[in-house]
């Protein structure tokens, strides 16, 4: 109790005594007044205590047992390399060990792709293992004096390389190795690198990485097979315990998705041959839209177009000057960058042959020449230049660019002057000058006689891409949106279309999704309609009918529960006449089942060698946990508590006042 609180209580006592003496001056001579004075003094004192509400600091103590976390690998590889029944029996022994539970607060968890509490038994059905996620979880525990026992084979299929990570200093870690640590002779295909697409009649590379752990040099045959036919093969000379990189160059002879199987001849005596084969796919494309940019200037905007369009498999980009030989008939879209009078012949040729075009103006553009071409606009001829910011037109409907914050992008530079439109153009961006709308378009789109036109009145569009990278640390979304705009301009006509995105080859158990995008005639994603999907397993004949899940941008269907096999799909909507068909294959493949041994080497990088035990040594580890248990931590909790109980104090006050009233009544003073 503080001295200040003690002083208040003494002052309250004095006030209660003083008020009582004022009311009962003759209490020394009158016995009745002495009794009444006692009741009144108690009432005054209790009332003062209620007003002061005294508090004291109280400290309580408790013992907190150290935390012991048992983390069990629940992936498929454990079922292959160990005996599941023995591991589940060990889990039950931990639950029922009274001494261990008295010494520690035990937390049982299981991990695979994710972490979860182990409430029942282990199923060993997880298709992937992510040990790095377990490390992040344990490191996030703020309490000190923790111990972790991780039971795993050390093999990881997804996530960051856990051998490069470490546990926090407040965590004592041991490992129980599940599986044999003696290596069997094994050779495998580590990786097959293949492009997503190639073009008809071109040759495409297939890059293969092969390794083995044999202590002798070997010669093994490597083949690339399609539909049972060997497309290419070679013999690999491999030194003892080495890896080899090799490459095949194959021709694309027909359009469509090609399923390629890469096979490696097993070593004599090799038990695990499931990792001697990998399947990949590549799309062979007949053609894609060709885009030509013509300019006589050296400007960063030209490099901008090259960088944005080079990653698109639907668009092929060329750059030429007006002096180069140009056959515009070869192209689906021609971009004129800051055209001059010298562009007259090629522009007239583009208009005459009804080829889509995109004009970009700027400080070096000859607008007098453009005004004479009757392109649907007239620009005032003023020599000075100005930088205009952009404002997105909310009424624009040709396509969606909402994912780009164009309003905050750097201004574009153009010649000063009013602009008049005398054709029905759609305005994507309006000009702003110092934050004020100047009521003049910055970027317009139009169409006449099935020819698409677009005019951007401003240079330095490369700064937009740079700003997007600064804000998002990536060019991806910006490039995709700009590619969509160029793709829209390069297409002569665009009807309602359904685009289906699904990987042609999917490993069983992978969290893959089939996506459907429906575009309306304005090239906008439209999700107003419902779409149904019919899936048929071509081998078993099983059929699944379902409705696609609808989101704001796409329709989806999860493929993670499908059994291995070849599937055909049919997608249609009862509200439209559009139907899409296709095929994909679910491979009977498990990354977990490719392992033959426990990965003790990586575990030793994470956990000290003396803290790693074989599963057969589990009893020794449990005994050490009991012997070397950390002391329980004494926790103190300090909190302020009221010195009085209000309920009882009010009852006591009511009692003193009541007794005083009854005594007065008894003495006839009321």
Image: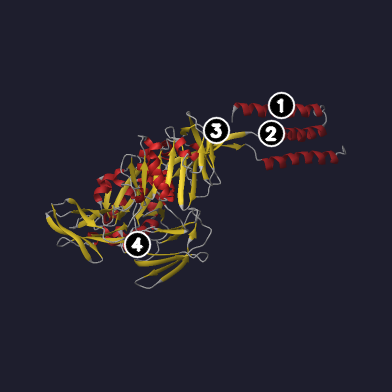
10 Å neighbourhood of mark 1: few (<14), some, or many (≥20)? some
Cα distance between the residues tagged 1 and 2 = 12 Å
Identify the colour scheme used.
Answer: secondary structure
Dot 4 falls on a residue whose secondary structure is loop
Which residue position holds label 2? 49
Cα distance between the residues tagged 1 and 4 = 86 Å
Cα distance between the residues tagged 4 and 2 = 74 Å
Which residue position holds label 4? 508
Q: Quick one: quadrant of the C terminus?
A: top right
10 Å neighbourhood of mark 3: few (<14), some, or many (≥20)? few
Q: Nearer the viewer, residue 354 or 110?
A: 354
Q: Which mark is residue 14?
A: 1
Q: Is residue 339 left or right of residue 217?
A: right
Q: Nearer the viewer, mark 1 or mark 4?
A: 4
Of the two numbered discs 4 and 2 on the same chain, state the one appearing first in sequence: 2
Cα distance between the residues tagged 3 and 4 = 55 Å
In the rendered image, which quarter is residue 53 located in? top right
10 Å neighbourhood of mark 2: few (<14), some, or many (≥20)? some
Image location of residue 17, percent across then percent down: 74, 28
Which residue position holds label 3? 435
Q: Is residue 16 left or right of residue 92?
A: right
Q: Nearer the viewer, residue 87 or 19?
A: 87
Q: Which mark is residue 403?
A: none
Of the two numbered discs 1 and 4 on the same chain, state the one appearing first in sequence: 1
Pointers 3 and 4 in contact (CB under 8 A)? no
Q: Nearer the viewer, mark 3 or mark 4?
A: 3
Dot 2 falls on a residue whose secondary structure is helix
Relative height, residue 256 to residue 241 (above, below): below
Of the two numbered discs 3 and 1 on the same chain, state the one appearing first in sequence: 1
């Amino acid at each position: 109790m503080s001295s200040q609180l003690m002083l208040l209580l003494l002052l309250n006592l004095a006030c209660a005594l003083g008020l009582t003496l004022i009311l009962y001056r003759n209490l020394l001579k009158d016995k009745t007044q002495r009794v009444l004075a006692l009741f009144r003094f108690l009432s005054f004192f209790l009332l003062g205590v209620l007003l002061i509400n005294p508090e004291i600091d109280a400290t309580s103590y408790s013992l907190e047992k150290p935390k012991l976390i048992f983390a069990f690998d629940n992936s498929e590889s454990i079922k292959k390399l160990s005996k599941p029944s023995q591991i589940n029996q060990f889990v039950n022994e931990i639950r029922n060990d009274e001494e261990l539970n008295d010494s520690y607060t035990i937390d049982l968890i299981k991990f695979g792709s994710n972490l979860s509490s182990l409430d029942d038994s282990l199923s060993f059905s997880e298709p992937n293992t992510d040990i790095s996620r377990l490390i992040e979880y344990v490191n996030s525990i703020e309490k000190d004096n923790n111990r972790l026992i991780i039971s795993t084979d050390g093999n990881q299929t997804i996530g960051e390389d856990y051998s490069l990570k470490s546990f926090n200093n407040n965590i004592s870690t041991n490992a129980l190795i599940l599986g044999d640590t003696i290596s069997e002779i094994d050779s495998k295909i580590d990786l097959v690198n293949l492009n997503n697409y190639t073009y008809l009649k071109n040759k495409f590379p297939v890059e293969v990485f092969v390794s083995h752990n044999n202590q002798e040099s070997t010669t093994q045959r490597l083949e690339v097979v399609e539909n049972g036919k060997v497309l290419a093969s070679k013999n690999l000379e491999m030194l003892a315990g080495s890896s080899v990189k090799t490459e095949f160059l194959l021709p694309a002879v027909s359009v469509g998705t090609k399923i390629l199987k890469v096979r490696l001849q097993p070593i004599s005596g090799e038990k695990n041959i499931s990792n001697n084969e990998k399947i990949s796919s590549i799309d062979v494309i007949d053609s894609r839209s060709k885009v030509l940019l013509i300019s006589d200037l050296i400007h960063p905007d030209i490099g901008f177009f090259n960088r944005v369009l080079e990653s698109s498999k639907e668009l092929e980009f060329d750059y030429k000057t007006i002096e180069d030989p140009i056959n515009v008939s070869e192209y689906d879209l021609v971009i004129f960058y800051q055209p001059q009078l010298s562009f007259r012949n090629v522009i007239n040729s583009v208009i005459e042959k009804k080829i889509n075009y995109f004009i970009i103006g700027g400080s070096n553009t000859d607008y007098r020449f453009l005004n004479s071409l009757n392109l649907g606009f007239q620009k005032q001829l003023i020599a000075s230049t100005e930088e205009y910011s952009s404002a997105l037109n909310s009424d624009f409907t040709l396509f969606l660019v909402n994912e780009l914050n164009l309003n905050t992008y750097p201004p574009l530079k153009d010649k000063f002057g009013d602009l008049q439109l005398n054709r029905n153009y759609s305005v994507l961006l309006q000009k702003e000058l110092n934050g004020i709308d100047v009521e003049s378009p910055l970027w317009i789109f139009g169409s006449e006689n099935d020819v698409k036109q677009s005019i951007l009145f401003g240079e330095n569009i490369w700064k937009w891409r740079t700003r997007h990278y600064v804000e998002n640390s990536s060019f991806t979304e910006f490039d995709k949106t700009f590619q969509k705009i160029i793709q829209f301009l390069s297409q002569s006509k665009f009807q309602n279309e359904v685009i289906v995105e699904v990987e042609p080859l999917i490993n069983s158990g992978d969290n893959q999704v089939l996506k459907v995008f429906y575009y309306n005639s304005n090239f906008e994603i439209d999700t107003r309609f419902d779409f149904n999907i019919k899936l048929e397993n071509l081998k078993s004949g099983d059929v699944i009918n379902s409705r696609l899940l609808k989101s704001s941008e796409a329709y989806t269907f999860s493929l993670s529960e499908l059994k291995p096999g070849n599937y055909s799909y049919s997608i249609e909507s009862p509200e439209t006449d559009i139907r899409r068909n296709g095929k994909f294959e679910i491979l009977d493949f498990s990354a977990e089942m490719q392992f033959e041994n426990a990965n003790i080497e990586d575990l030793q990088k994470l956990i000290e060698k003396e803290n790693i035990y074989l599963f057969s040594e589990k009893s020794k580890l449990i005994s050490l946990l009991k012997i070397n248990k950390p002391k329980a931590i004494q926790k103190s909790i300090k909190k302020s508590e009221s010195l009085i109980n209000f309920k009882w104090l009010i009852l006591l006050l009511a009692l003193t006042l009541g007794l005083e009233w009854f005594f007065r009544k008894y003495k006839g003073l009321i």
